[in-house]
Amino acid sequence: MGVVKKIGVFTSGGDSPGMNAAIRAVVRSALYHNLEVVGIMRGYEGLINGEIIQMDRKSVANIIQRGGTILKTARSAEFRTPEGRKKAFEQIKKHQIDALVGVGGDGTFTGANIFIEEFGVPVMGLPGTIDNDLAGTDYTIGYDTALNTVVDAVDKIRDTAESHDRLFIVEVMGRDSGLIALRSGIGSGAEAILIPETKTDFPHLMERLEHGRKDKSSKIIIVAEGDDVGAIQVADAVKDRFPNIDTRVSILGHIQRGGSPSCMDRVLASRLGVAAVEALLEGRKGEMVGLVNNEIRFTPFKQAIKHIGEVNPNLLKIVEILSL
Ligand code: F6P
């Protein structure tokens, strides 16, 4: 593949708020550089099926503030097969697409890497996931909005918890990562946070509930979806041991993936989208564009998907200190 004249943009995997801002940034900066740009619907699935639409300045007007993705998204099983990827490449040739920008997470980048190795099509990636579980960027597009959604929900839960003197166990998203739980827990003043990166210390949790301050009228425990114990089981154990504590479980679910992106996510998506197009023009490929210490950073897909599964122990300590 030679000079880049035509770019295809797509979103893939779980959606995240700010994906539209990223699409807008890719389309507008491609046009700024006098490139042609097409949108590929439903991620790799749409590429295989040739669901490809022409994009212009107007097709991305009034979307910066919208959640979800106008290009729709999917997790494509067919793209995981060599036959599926061959079909995708046929479409690339048919539509004379020279390079791709994909917005997504580890599945998106893993697919892109194989596609580059097999067919040499340049692909750059933008980190679009609420989980923040990619290496090579301080924040992923959608994480900040999801945190604000969780904090807003927990504030509301606290109102009712306070009125009824209840303990609420709140489950937040994060199949493999506790980063949503950790930050939203600090931001909402949680008593405890349970995350997949650390083994749940049940005796310690029970100890704290037994000997903690008795005059607290509301208590919130945030549990990440991927925690080794899980919200329901934690609630059952608490009810067993402390029948006098009025305990409820609230699973926030997919509301965390929707909504208008925060300003932080819009700016992040805009900066990364512009950088991705410039990177393709400079001949880069196979990298995720991220922001580290407020500077653009390129990370090979293989490394970006290696989220280390470690959390900052200081943040966990902060929860303990502040929940006195
Ligand atoms: O990848 C983001 C994420 O929100 C995970 O935290 C969660 O486990 C998953 O998506 C759920 O996605 P779905 O319901 O779309 O399969």
Image (cartoon, rainbow, N blue to C red):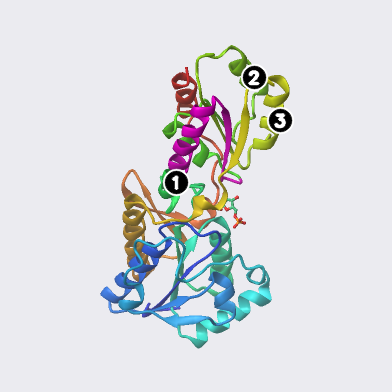
| Residue sitting at the far left | 32
Q: In this view, does 238 lie to the left or right of 71?
A: right
> Which quarter of the rendering shows the N terminus?
bottom left
Q: What stretch is highlighted in magenta?
A: 149-175
Frontmost residue, 26 versus 187: 187
Give SS at disc 2: helix
Taking the spot 52% from the left edge, 73% from the top edge, the residue there is 120
Q: At 63% across and 18% down in the image, what residue appears?
A: 204
Q: Nearer the viewer, residue 295 or 56?
A: 56
User: Does residue 246 lie above or below 299 as drawn?
Assistant: above
Q: Which of marks 3 and 2 is nearer the N terminus?
A: 2
Foreground residue among 196 and 152: 152
Q: Look at label 1 and name its amino acid.
A: Thr
Mark 3: secondary structure: helix
The residue identified by callout 3 is 236
Give the image location of residue 20, x and y in percent. Answer: 40, 64
Q: What element carries label 1?
A: helix
The residue positioned farthest toward the right in the image shown: 240
**Residue annotated with mark 1:** 149
Tell me the amino acid under the disc marked 2.
Met
Residue indicated by mark 2: 206
Question: Residue 212: which quarter of the image?
Answer: top right
Residue 318 at least partly seen: yes
User: What's the CA distance linking mark 1 and mark 2?
Assistant: 29 Å
Outermost top residue: 211
Q: CB atoms at circles 3 and 2 under 8 Å apart?
A: no
Q: Is residue 156 magenta?
A: yes
Q: Which comes before the other along the chain, label 1 or label 2? A: 1
